Structure formats: C-alpha cells, structure tokens
C-alpha cells in the first residue's frame, strides 16, 4: 500500500481514517484466514482417527484475534482382557483414544525416534511369551482388525494381535494446514 499526500490537514486526516480502516479490515481477514485453516485441520483430523475416531471430538477457539487454538477431546476408555488361558481374571487399563489414534500401539507404535515400544514389541516378555505378537483371551470370538482369532484346546478364544496401527489424525491435520496455507491466504487476502 502506498499513499501520496500533502501536509494539508484534511489529507492527513483522510489518510489516518484510511489506515485505521485498513487495519480493521486486515484484522478481520487474519481472523477469517485462521478460522479457515482451523476448519481444514479439524476436518482432516476427524476423517483420520481410525478405529478411535468416534471417541474423539475437535474444537477451535480464538484466544485473541490472531491466535486460534484447536483442541482434541476424548475421555479415557477402558481396555479389558483375560490375563491368561487358565484364569477368568480380567485385566483392565485406561487408555487415551487420542494417543492410540496418533501413535498406535504394540508392534505398530511410534513412541519417538528411538523405535517401537510397548506391548507387542519385539521383546518376548511383552508378548505373553508369544514371539509373533501379543494376545488376550476371550470367551467370545472377536477381531478388532490387525490380528487373528484362534480357538485353543480348552474352547477359549485367543485374539492374537500385532497392535493398532497409528492413523495420525493430528499430524495429518497439521500437514493439511501447511499444504493449504498459501492457497487459503491468496483467497482471503487477495
């Protein structure tokens, strides 16, 4: 934006009004831009939650006119499994659907740069002494995907799993925003 004005008080006053109007318009456009980016992120995250997507909700709010915060919400869910084939004792553990969706579990877990970790890793003790994965016992056949159901000699069902693959909804949301930032900026700011 470039202005050529004389030192006449009427022209200087008009310039100040134009600059204030431009500032108001620019602030409005920044808010629209941030809101559009947040909507892209939420839409992509909602589509990519995998098996845990129905437990997760996303929201956005403005902290001020130039900061939008996107939040993923979920309550912990309880996982239950039989501790072994000879017992009816059920083990339970609360897990975070957001963490399971983002990072996966078991053989497919992505805890960081150091490699895989947690239940279902290559450590045989994390597999209930099963070198091909990890398992839990059930009275009813069930399959949650990524594994197989085996009936043992006692008529109980063993669900054998390598874990849950990460679907990475939050990572994909950030990447979608990065890839679309220029296009949305052009649309909003012209």
Image (cartoon, rainbow, N blue to C red):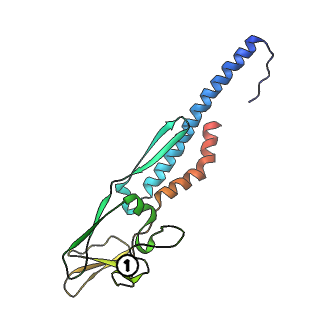
Q: Quadrant of residue 148?
A: bottom left
Q: Residues within 10 Å of mark 1 (few under 14, many from 20)?
A: some
**Relative vertical location of residue 33 with respect to residue 118 in this rendering, above or below:** above
* Residue closest to the eye, 158 or 90: 90
Q: Which residue is mark 1?
A: 126
Report the front residue among 117 and 11: 117
Q: Position of residue 34 (x, y in %)?
A: 55, 41
Find numbered disc 1 in the image and state the secondary structure of the residue it sits on: helix
Q: x, y percentage for residue 126? A: 37, 78
Q: Residue at x 55, y 37 (%)?
A: 32
Q: Residue at horizontal 46%, vertical 50%?
A: 43
Residue 163 position by quadrant: bottom left
Q: How many marks?
A: 1
Residue 136 located left or right of residue 16:
left
Q: Position of residue 188 (x, y in %)?
A: 60, 38
Left/right placement of residue 105 relative to residue 31 reads left
Q: Name the outermost residue toward the bottom.
A: 153
Q: Quadrant of the C terminus?
A: top right
Residue 57's place in the image compared with 77, above or below, is above
Residue at the image position 41 percent from the left and 72 percent from the top: 118
């Amino acid at each position: 934006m470039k202005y050529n004005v004389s030192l006449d008080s009427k022209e200087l006053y008009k310039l100040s009004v134009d600059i204030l109007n431009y500032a108001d318009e620019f602030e409005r456009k920044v808010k629209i831009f941030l809101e559009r980016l947040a909507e892209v992120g939420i839409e992509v995250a909602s589509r990519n939650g995998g098996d845990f997507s129905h437990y997760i909700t996303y929201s956005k709010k403005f902290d001020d006119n130039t900061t939008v915060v996107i939040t993923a919400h979920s309550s912990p869910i309880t996982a239950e499994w039989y501790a072994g084939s000879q017992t009816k004792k059920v083990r339970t553990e609360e897990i975070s659907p957001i963490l399971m969706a983002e990072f996966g579990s078991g053989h497919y877990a992505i805890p960081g740069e150091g490699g895989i970790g947690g239940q279902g890793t290559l450590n045989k003790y994390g597999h209930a002494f099963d070198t091909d994965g990890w398992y839990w016992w059930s009275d009813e056949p069930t399959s949650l995907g990524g594994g197989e159901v085996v009936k043992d000699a006692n008529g109980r069902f063993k669900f054998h799993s390598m874990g849950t693959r990460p679907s990475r909804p939050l990572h994909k949301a950030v990447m979608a925003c990065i890839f679309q930032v220029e296009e949305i900026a052009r649309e909003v700011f012209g």
